Amino acid sequence: MSKNVILQHRIPARMRELNAFIRLADKLEGAGNVTLKVDAVVFEMSDPRFLLHPLADSAALMARSLLHFLGIGYDAKHDALKAAPWRQGDLSMPDLNLAAVSPTRAVSGWTVASVRADDLLKLCFVTGNKVSAHLTNESAMTTSASIDELREAFQLVTDLINREVFQTLGQDDVTFEPGGAFGSISEQRKST
């Protein structure tokens, strides 16, 4: 796969899923009726979980996937980040002529303490593995995967991808601002 496809399509598409959760999850949690307009068709959802749960699951899985791309894995037995083993066919940092990111580097250099960054990245793995990828006894509640915790974790993964991939390659960060190349989610207040 070409570097351009990875950098302009594959990675930003996964980051977009994180951004959708970051932008919408807290608005959906506890909401009543949800209205979704697609072109001229309007959908009424009686329960916001029709959107919230798929957003959470996709973001958890994509956060785990992006961390794996960087070369970061998780040792559940020791509750520790580790180097991820890449398999043939996995897209990975060497596909961009970049080295794997060590867990130590991944949790360093942020405005939050490295211990906090470590906890947030581990939350991505635990949630992705035990809540979203498999039906287990675990749930978002048992893994402390609150909306706020997940939003912070997914933002850290977004920032980590931008720092270790796009900034390292001298490219602009992938952002989801109005008018940007990768799209955006804009809040439109209903006029009364």
Image (cartoon, rainbow, N blue to C red):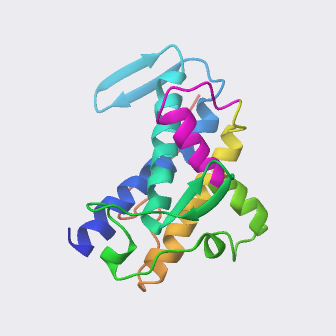
Q: Is residue 52 visible?
A: yes
Q: Position of residue 116 (x, y in %)?
A: 76, 60
Give the magenta range. Answer: 122-141
114 lies left or right of 83: right
Q: Is residue 189 visible?
A: no
Q: Is residue 63 above or below residue 6?
A: above
Q: Residue at x 50, y 52 (%)?
A: 64
Image quadrant where one finds the N terminus: bottom left
60 lies left or right of 10: right
Q: Is residue 156 above or below residue 94?
A: above
Q: Position of residue 2 (x, y in %)?
A: 21, 72
Q: Residue at x 40, y 62 (%)?
A: 179
Quadrant housing residue 38 = top left
Q: Is residue 166 above or below residue 58?
A: below
Which residue reaches farthest front?
77
Image quadrant where one finds the C terminus: top right
The verdict on residue 128 being magenta is yes
* Viewer-proximal residue among 33 and 174: 174
159 lies left or right of 11: right
127 lies left or right of 61: right
* Viewer-proximal residue among 139 and 56: 139
Q: Residue at x 49, y 68 (%)?
A: 161
Quadrant housing residue 130 = top right
Which residue reaches farthest left?
1
Q: Residue at x 64, y 32 (%)?
A: 140
Which residue reaches farthest top?
46
Q: Position of residue 152 (x, y in %)?
A: 67, 53
The verdict on residue 188 being magenta is no
Q: Position of residue 180 (x, y in %)?
A: 40, 64
